[in-house]
Image (cartoon, rainbow, N blue to C red):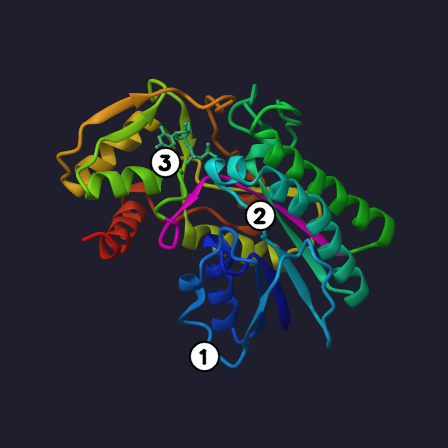
Amino acid sequence: MRILVTGGAGFIGSHLCERLLAEGHHVLCLDNFLTGDEENIAHLISNRSFELIRQSIVDSLELNGSLDTILHFASPASPPDYLKHPIETLKVGSIGTLNALELAKSKKAKFLLASTSEVYGDPLVHPQPESYWGNVSSIGPRSVYDEAKRFSEALTMAYHRAHGLDTRIVRIFNTFGPRMRKEDGRAIPNFITQALSGRPITVYGNGSQTRSFCYISDLVEGIRRLMDFNFHDPVNLGNPEEKTLLDLAKIIVRLTRSPSPLVFQPLPTDDPKQRCPQIQQARQKLNWAPKISLEDGLKETIAWFSKGIV
Ligand code: UDP
């Protein structure tokens, strides 16, 4: 297959490119490197089945030749990144998604949207099933990402209904692993880099908020299965093992044998208090469940971050 991955030089995008190349597909990786990183795809550049297109999907894109599938992963995705790039985030979720869908329509390609657990906002239903409509602020700081992704979902369903486009929507919950940027500001890269360099571990609020962390290889496997499964409604992918942020910080301190103290800092505005995926649909339809435990995934991630921090 000839597959376009938008955001292909990002954390998740680059792991997807790698997996698809390993399966023998031809991969077009589109990235404007706003939050993507050349390093993530450096080992793929010499592969003759890999092509890099340096541009944003917000700018119109004309491609020669056939295209079988588009995986639309382009977007800033960490809260500090989308707070720093609010307009770019809204543009890539709206104009970017429109351009990607138009391309899929003209090429008669399958289209898979990377959506997010942020569509549930600060959820009032726990754990979150796909049927939950969410509790989202349309004007708060996180709205630039949350509403862009909600719009992307709406647009994807509209193309499916109006044009019969063969679409998929994956709602990705917190995912971690090698190739997260150490400065991307999310909890796991922050805690690991702080622990490895002996700096204080910054827990926001009192650390009682929860998240559920999925290792990257599990996520990629789920996405791969969803690509091949004929189903158009959103599917949650994430690890249902829920942890408080305080527990996460303590686990990372223990695994790194770090002398770092924990320090408590203000909770960001609209920070969701709890988040955990209900993954019944993925279990039943895709026969998928995460295999890597939080601790095993953290060990791999710590080993990877250790290489960059001397
Ligand atoms: N967080 C924290 N310390 C940090 C970074 C994040 O306590 O240095 C908290 C953050 O407030 C949130 C949780 O960790 O409650 C997960 O944040 P992250 O940015 O990783 O992703 P989110 O789930 O908010 O998109």
Whether pointer 2 and pointer 1 mark residues with C-beta atoms closer than 8 Å, the reply is no
Q: In the image, what residue occupies the spot 46% across and 24% down?
A: 274
Ligand 1 is in which quadrant of the figure? top left
Of the two numbered discs 1 and 3 on the same chain, state the one appearing first in sequence.
1
Of the two numbered discs 3 and 2 on the same chain, state the one appearing first in sequence.
2
Q: Is mark 1 on a helix, strand or loop?
A: loop
- 280, above or below 220, in the image: above
The residue type indicated by label 3 comes to Ala
- 71, above or below 115, in the image: below
Q: Which residue, given by chain and number where applicable, does mark 3 sit on?
A: 187
- Tally of numbered tags: 3
Q: Distance between the residues labelled 2 and 1?
A: 25 Å
Q: Which residue, given by chain and number where applicable, does mark 2 sit on?
A: 75
Which residue is at the far bottom? 48
Q: In the image, what residue occupies the spot 22% across and 31% down?
A: 200
Q: Is mark 3 within 8 Å of ligand 1?
A: yes
What's the magenta region? 166-181
Q: Which residue, given by chain and number where applicable, does mark 1 sit on?
A: 46
Asked if residue 174 is among those painted magenta in the image, a careful observer would answer yes
Asked if residue 99 is among those painted magenta in the image, a careful observer would answer no
Q: Position of residue 139 (x, y in %)?
A: 64, 24
In the image, is 53 to the left or to the right of 167?
Answer: left
Q: In the image, what residue occupies the spot 71% across and 44% down?
A: 94
**Residue 231 visible in the shown view:** no
Q: How far apart are marks 1 and 3 (CA)?
A: 33 Å
